Image: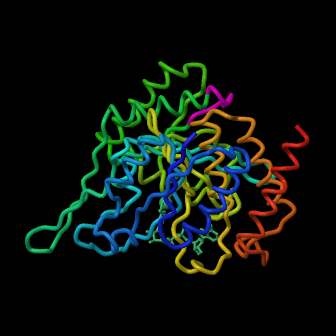
Amino acid sequence: MKCCVIPGDGIGPEVVSAAVEILHHFFPKLQIENAVAGWGSFQDTGEAVPPLTLDKVRACGAALFGAVSSPTYPVDGYKSAVVTLRKQLDLYANLRPVQSSQGDVDLIIFRENSEGLYAGRESLSADGQSAVAERHISKKASSRIARKAGEVAIALGRKKITIVHKANVMPISDGLFRDTVKTTLLDCASHIEVDELLADIAAFWLLRDPGRFDVIVTTNLFGDILSDAAAHWGGGMGLVPSLNWGDNIALAEPVHGSAPDIAGRGVANPMATILSAALLVRYHWRRPKVAGQIEAAVRQTVLNGPHTPDLGGQATTRQVTKAILDRCADLQREN
Ligand code: NAI
Ligand code: MG
């Protein structure tokens, strides 16, 4: 087994090394291939994602990614590293599960990961007075994300899939998305209930009654925004994992970013990245029992501490990682 490890910027290296420790606990022979990407890499080498990094991920088939920093103003030659990785590696699905510690929220967002507004295809007019962002929606991408969602929903015994779109104002592009997702689900998951919601009211229901959601399928930017909102129910940004997923390659990454406000202090919550590693274990390496043990160890630590400051505690990343490792060892012994 091989895993390419891309720490990235800010708290990325801090949380990734915690997750690597957990992976090594269960898989002592796991081979780690280190690679660079992000703003730091761009400043050092002129490339946010060097070709060598792409080669390494392809060779490993699996990757663990921390987070990268991206400026909010245009920089010549720079494009968000994570968008480039998703595109170059054809990681067309982004799976984002959110579970509350009480168990009353247990939803999975399937975010289309390859197109839409998030692809960042923008241009400024010659006179600098206007700008255009292109939003491509294709049958191919819509059908692929729907199939992935349908397959996982069946495997997990899920009951309902909600398509989230904005076809009332974008009836052509989001209409194509909605109709393609529906048709695909009818084909691959016909016994699962399918409904639909407009993205704005979906945001309302995510705040008001998140328990009504089971599986959500949505376009790239809506998925980005709604998963940060849903992260609240999962215990905050320090807890929500994700898996970028293609046909043969999976790249796990926390939903959060590089958190420059706390970087370098050793107090970032490693749980989101550890849970992302668990997604890699469950879906890519197909070791659900190990994934379940990692998830249970994190859950027990959420309930009984120690906690990093984002969860109201004073523990360091190291102390929380050590506690999770100890619980992993206990759970392994009990089984
Ligand atoms: P952020 O997710 O980095 O931080 C938002 C808030 O959550 C901050 O207060 C931060 O301290 C806190 N937080 C995040 N992760 C945490 C953790 N593990 N433990 C404890 N607290 C945590 O989002 P923000 O501040 O909007 O963006 C910061 C940078 O991250 C930007 O440059 C942005 O482009 C980048 N970013 C990168 C992503 C990626 O690499 N996939 C995703 C989102 C943002
Ligand atoms: Mg985001």
Left or right of 108: which side holds 323? right
Above or below: residue 83 compared with residue 214:
below
| The stretch drawn in magenta includes residue 137 | no
Is residue 289 or residue 26 the one in the foreground?
Answer: 26
Tell me which colouring the rendered structure shows.
rainbow
- Residue 114: image x %, image y %? 36, 45
- Residue 252: image x %, image y %? 54, 49
Quadrant (top left/top right/bottom left/bottom right) for the C terminus:
top right
Left or right of 284: which side holds 159? right
- Residue 131: image x %, image y %? 20, 66
Above or below: residue 289 compared with residue 254:
above
Left or right of 12: which side holds 324? right
**Which residue sits at x=62%, y=45%?**
30
- Give the residue at the far right of this rendering: 334
The count of marks equals: 0
**Residue 41 falls in image quadrant:** bottom left
Q: Is residue 101 visible?
A: yes
| The stretch drawn in magenta includes residue 159 | yes
Is residue 303 or residue 78 the one in the foreground?
Answer: 78
**Which residue sits at x=8%, y=70%?**
126
**Which residue sits at x=28%, y=45%?**
136
Q: Is residue 207 visible?
A: no
- Residue 228: image x %, image y %? 56, 60
Left or right of 239: which side holds 6? left
**Which residue sits at x=48%, y=51%?**
223
Quadrant (top left/top right/bottom left/bottom right) for the N terminus:
top right
Is residue 335 or residue 77 the one in the foreground?
Answer: 335
Magenta region: 154-161
